[in-house]
Amino acid sequence: MDWTALELSLRLAGWTVAILLPVSILFGRFLAFRQFRGKALVEALVMLPLVLPPTVLGFYLLVTFGRNSPIGQLWQDVFGSQLVFSFTGLVIASVIFNLPFAIQPAQRGFQAIPAELREAASCCGMSPLRALWQVELPLAWPGVVTAMVLTFAHTLGEFGIVLMVGGSIPGETRTIAISIYDRVQAFDTDSAAIMSAVLVAISVTTIAVTFALSARVGRRLS
Amino acid sequence: MALEVSAQASAPIPLDVAFRVAPGELLALVGHSGSGKTTLLRMIAGLWTPTQARVAVNGKTWLDTRARVNLAPHRRRVGLVFQNYALFPHMSAAQNVMAAMDKPDPAEAGRILDLVNLKDLGARHPAQLSGGQQQRVAVARALARRPQALLLDEPFSAVDRATREKLYAEIIALRAHLNMPVVLVTHDVNEAQLLADRMLVIESGRVLSQGTVAEVMADATALRAMGIRELAALLPATVAEHLPDGLTRLDTPSGPLFLPRVASPPGTRVRVRIMAHEVIVARTRPEGLSAQNILAGTVAQIVPGQGPAVMVHITVGAHEIIARITRRAAGQLALRPGDPVHAIVKSMSVARDHVTPAGATIGD
């Protein structure tokens, strides 16, 4: 059992969720309520990582973040370390890759709020920020929570993109999914089995918790 | 603290309207669905902006398209009761009320809920309340905003008839506590006539008629738009006695009026809406007639209609009853202004929700 890899995976998932939570709320809300030219294009772009093979996305990120790219060079100059094959690079890749999982469910959550309730909030004198906090989030949060659970679970299991951008550096970029692959390559099936079981347990738990929470909200609002 | 509104627009619906509502006054915007009345209400609240419009309350401009003033809804002190109430489903009744306060105050919320007869239900969520109770919470929430204009969008359309009667009485009673202009949007002429001080009849975004309820009721154009069968007069009366046979005796200056059981207790001053097409006119006091109510009066004027009917305005005491009878009948009776006549009203022709407490409306 590779505890370092598990810890690394949880840390990566935690950072991804932490960064994507505000993005999911603000951008999901924006897409839910605003109509603008090119909205369909933006929505399609957000969905792109869902249909793109992870290795393809990983390849482009590797090229974009690499030492020979402007971004990679700028990063190198400012922080003195390279972006690819580092935990930071992994977090950035993970954030990009999880955009559809983080935004789509939140957008659906906000869209489910009747327009009349938002109008009522403003007629009650609530500023947009207060309305978000007192009316929209309490009603849309099942969507936001679903988004975060999906993001979390998805990050734990991501393989292709991590391998492309991060490689398999123990303690830096070797996540549990990579570790499982390594163990299988080394014919250490027992370790792979234990780690796989741990991943299954975490995934089942998170999904169960979301469903339980959604059901509770459903009961309260019906 | 008057509310002044004017609006011109061509889309999404053509609109050309101007009106003013005095403090404490209730104006009913009456029109069919699609006439633009709800759109107007949304404009006052700031939820919709037409091409050219002005909304000012108490001298303060909320919207002036020419001066490029357009306050966001939350910056307008407006109380809006939505047609389907739009209560926040995740909040209790008391929390809904507090949501509209600048500084949430549970004691104040309790006081306002008390005002709408919901004192003990503050902890309930909207899903646990009946339609009528939800409407009361919506009214309480609108009042909690301390609005400078109170807007009611078809507030009685989502409840059953029995509840509606109760809510009419409550709104009438509540008006004693309201000193801001009130705008009621409705398609129900009965509702408008019973609750409003003034009426504005709107059709396809244009004002057909506006004035006091009596003025609008005497306006042929307005009547055509509302439906001539809505023509009715309001007769003030006092509940005298609930009779064992299920009728209630009411006293009017021109004699007793027997109606199906009225909800209010004896002593209550009420207003009875008497439909013009239900009134029979007789030269002499008829005998051997099943109708229970025969009111003596004099013909004030006879207004010809477009079809085969004429409207006979009959002065009864200090008030007026309108009878819509055929031109032929008026001819046979040779009715002329000043003639003594009797107005006959069947008890059963007065619907229960056509009787409401008189309350403290302006002009009463």
Image: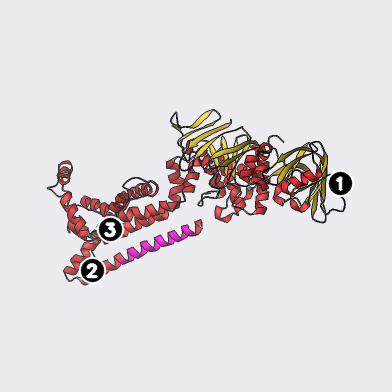
- Residue B303, horizontal then vertical, whole percent: 71, 39
Q: Is residue A16 left or right of residue B325?
A: left
* Element type where label 3 sits in the image: helix
- Residue B322, horizontal then vertical, whole percent: 74, 42
- Residue A192, labelled with which disc? 2
Q: Are marks 1 and 3 on the same chain?
A: no
At label 2, counting other C-alpha atoms closer than 10 Å, the crowd grade (few under 14, some 14-19, many 20 or more) is many
At label 3, counting other C-alpha atoms closer than 10 Å, the crowd grade (few under 14, some 14-19, many 20 or more) is some
**Which residue is labeled 1 in the image?**
B285
Q: Are marks 2 and 1 in contact (CB under 8 Å)?
A: no
Amino acid under disc 3:
Leu
Q: CA distance from mark 1 to mark 3?
A: 87 Å
In the figure, residue B116 lies in which quadrant?
A: top right
At label 1, counting other C-alpha atoms closer than 10 Å, the crowd grade (few under 14, some 14-19, many 20 or more) is some
Q: Mark 2, mark 3: which one is toward the viewer?
A: 3
- Residue A50, labelled with which disc? 3
Q: Mark 1, mark 3: which one is toward the viewer?
A: 1
Amino acid under disc 1:
Arg
Q: Are marks 1 and 3 in contact (CB under 8 Å)?
A: no
Q: CA distance from mark 2 to mark 1?
A: 105 Å
- Residue A161, horizontal then vertical, whole percent: 21, 58
Residue farthest toward the right in the current orientation of the protein? B287
User: Is residue B106 in view?
Assistant: no
Q: Quick one: B190 or B238, which is closer to the camera?
A: B190
